[in-house]
Amino acid sequence: MNFLKRVTAVVVCFMISPLAGLCAPQGGTQRAGQIDALIPAATRNAQTAKAKDEVDWNDLLKTAHNGRVRAGLTDGSILSVGSDSELRVVQHDAASQQTSLELDYGKVRNQVTNITKSGGKYELKTPNAVIGVIGTDFVTLYRNNKTTVWCLKGHVKVTPLGKVASNSGTQSSTDNTVTLAEGQMVVITSVIPSAGFQATSTPPAEAQNLQLATDVPDGNLPPPGDTRYATPTHAARTLLVGGAISVGLALGLGLGTRGGHTVETGTQGCKPSPAVVCPGP
């Protein structure tokens, strides 16, 4: 009898194991995309991130003050994570067009491919807002209990989980959602200032700089105009090197000027010329 029970248990396990595999939730081993470029320092799941690293479901991308990451998702969408940011790729299924992201803090640009499948969604959550899109380009910043969403292209639908502090889009009177068109912005906060909210008709300078603050160029180089990571240009390097050589020659040979001409202060080896005046004995 015990033998029959064991055999029956084994058979049942083999029968249900494929179903269990089908029903099991897809976890962190399911691929969502890969890191295309980055400016160190950045990590993926607390490990140093590198270009071409795979990005899976539930992966956590984190950047330091001098780091940025650009990741390409499998459906062609692009995530550009700015510095001092933390973004979790909760889910990304290109076949069913189901994408769920969580921005714990910092800033991220989302360049989203069009959603064409019924029931498809692309959703980004912050602690006090939910941003949903069909296909668009937008930047989100979460800092100091405040979510800022700026639409660069297309339309963005924002569901406030806090108080709308300022809004240049259209807010629904039924479900309180805010729809943003190109160039429009909404700010949502969890903390209401004692003086109340100040009305604004145009995005603040901080929001206008969000696009630049999330740029991650190819080759792991700083984006143009970003002075935080600026390196000397070729002309500047030439000037610096030339200046250093000039200083070195002046120190080593002892050069001076007299009457608009170069004067070699040392007498040994001095060769007079129209441009060089040798000092007298």
Image (tube, rainbow, N blue to C red):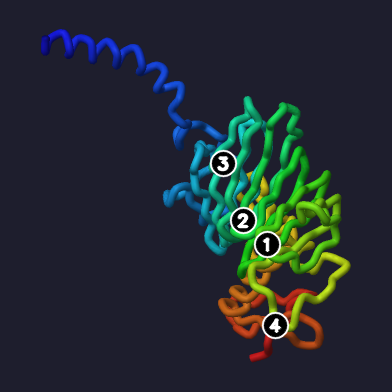
Nearer mark to the viewer, of 4 and 2? 4
Q: Is residue 29 above or below residue 109?
A: above
Residue in the foreground of this view, choosing between 94 and 80: 94
Quadrant, the N terminus: top left
- In the rendered structure, find residue 126 and report the number of the disc placed on it: 2
- The residue drawn where x is 54% and y is 42% is 90
* Residue contact between numbered discs 1 and 2, judged by CB atoms under 8 Å: yes
In the rendered image, which quarter is residue 76 located in?
top right
Please report whichever mark, 1 or 4, sits nearer to the chain's N-terminal start. 1
- In the rendered structure, find residue 147 and report the number of the disc placed on it: 1
- In the rendered structure, find residue 35 and report the number of the disc placed on it: 3
Q: Is residue 217 above or below residue 232?
A: above
Q: Position of residue 113 (x, y in %)?
A: 73, 35
- The residue drawn where x is 60% and y is 83% is 266
* Residue contact between numbered discs 2 and 3, judged by CB atoms under 8 Å: no
Of the residues shown, which amino acid type is indicated by label 2?
Thr
- In the rendered structure, find residue 194 and report the number of the disc placed on it: 4
Please report whichever mark, 4 or 3, sits nearer to the chain's N-terminal start. 3
Q: Position of residue 94 (x, y in %)?
A: 63, 29
